[in-house]
Image (tube, rainbow, N blue to C red):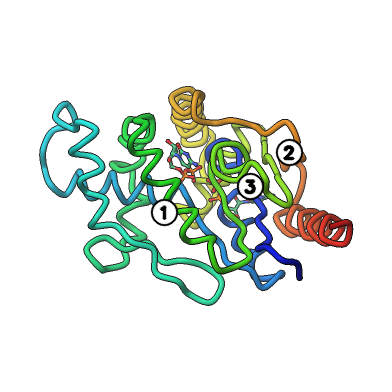
Amino acid sequence: MSGDRNVVITIDGPAASGKSSTAQWVAEKLGFRHVDSGSLYRALTAALLRQGAPPERWTPAVMTGQGSRVALRPEPTSFLTLIDGVPAEEEIRGTLVTSHVSLVARVPEVRAWVNARVREAAQDHDVVVDGRDMGTAVFPEATLKIFLIADPWERARRRLAQRLERGATEEEIAAETALLVQRDARDATQTVQAKDAVVLDTTYLTQAEQVERIVALARAVSHEA
Ligand code: CDP
Ligand code: CDP
């Protein structure tokens, strides 16, 4: 897509609504780069956990002090999240990081640090960025804003299928639903839907369908511009 300034597509929504995988797929279809803002909150949390100090001692300065250990390395259609120069994908998606990340993400100094990294990543390329507040706090002028939602039970089922690589039992899905709803509540203040976002309920869509819809919207919007 062409134009004077880079195209920015934002995809926001609650936990496991499909943001990252959809953003990555859309980026590949359009030749954009995917920026995963959640991975920065996760990496900062993982760096803090590695240090070993208990969370009660994580002051805003201690949290942002870990920022120099975290970096995004550009790849053709994405960024790899590094801690101390090494990819840490498995660690940042782990349950320990997941249960501590909202605590870190609610600190304004941390949010300012993440937002600055995301803006840097978007400087020289057309991007698809995903998170909770990309269409509001970071890119209020984005070309296209999407807000993904899905039924919590379905989100939990998908998250478990992704993690376990097998079908989950009803009990496992119920426990995961409770964790997701709890994290949504902790993230509520930082999850901000833009007034001009297109809301997509993916409960009854396949991943391919939701990707197609976003790609079609992106093409329509860029022809308008
Ligand atoms: O994939 P999932 O939705 O479970 O989480 P994520 O996108 O990797 O984000 C992890 C955590 O980072 C969230 O639970 C939020 O606490 C925080 N986050 C945020 O506050 N704002 C963002 N733009 C992105 C993530
Ligand atoms: O980034 P976020 O936490 O919002 O979600 P994700 O990790 O991208 O997606 C969670 C899982 O749901 C992934 O395994 C997706 O492939 C899957 N999924 C989906 O996003 N949409 C569907 N319609 C079906 C499955």
Q: Quadrant of the C terminus?
A: bottom right
Q: CA distance from mark 2 to mark 3?
A: 9 Å
Residue carrying label 3: 11
Tag in front: 1 or 2: 1
Q: Secondary structure at mark 1?
A: helix
Q: Nearer the viewer, mark 1 or mark 3?
A: 1
Vertical comparison of 199 with 178: above or below: below
Badge 2, how many Cα within 10 Å: few under 14, some, many 20+?
some
Q: Is residue 166 left or right of residue 106?
A: right
Asked whether the beta carbons under mark 1 and mark 3 sit within 8 Å of each other, the answer is: no
Q: Disc 1 designates what residue? A: 117
Q: Which mark is residue 150?
A: none
Q: Which residue is mark 2?
A: 197
Residue 221: quarter of image:
bottom right
Q: Are marks 2 and 3 in contact (CB under 8 Å)?
A: no
Please state which amino acid type lies under the numbered disc 1. Answer: Arg
Quarter holding the N terminus is: bottom right
x, y percent for residue 86: 27, 68
Give residue 59's quadrant in the image.
top left
Q: Label 2 CB, ligand 1: below 8 Å?
A: no
**Among numbered discs 2 and 3, the one appearing first in the sequence:** 3
Q: Earlier in the sequence, mark 1 or mark 2?
A: 1
Number of residues whose C-alpha sits closer than 10 Å to that of mark 1, classed few (under 14), some (14–19) or many (20 or more):
some
Closest to the observer: 46 or 66? 66
Q: Residue at x 71, y 70 (%)?
A: 29
Pinpoint residue 88: horizontal percent, then vertical percent. Answer: 31, 61
- CB within 8 Å, label 1 to label 2: no
Q: Is residue 90 left or right of residue 221?
A: left
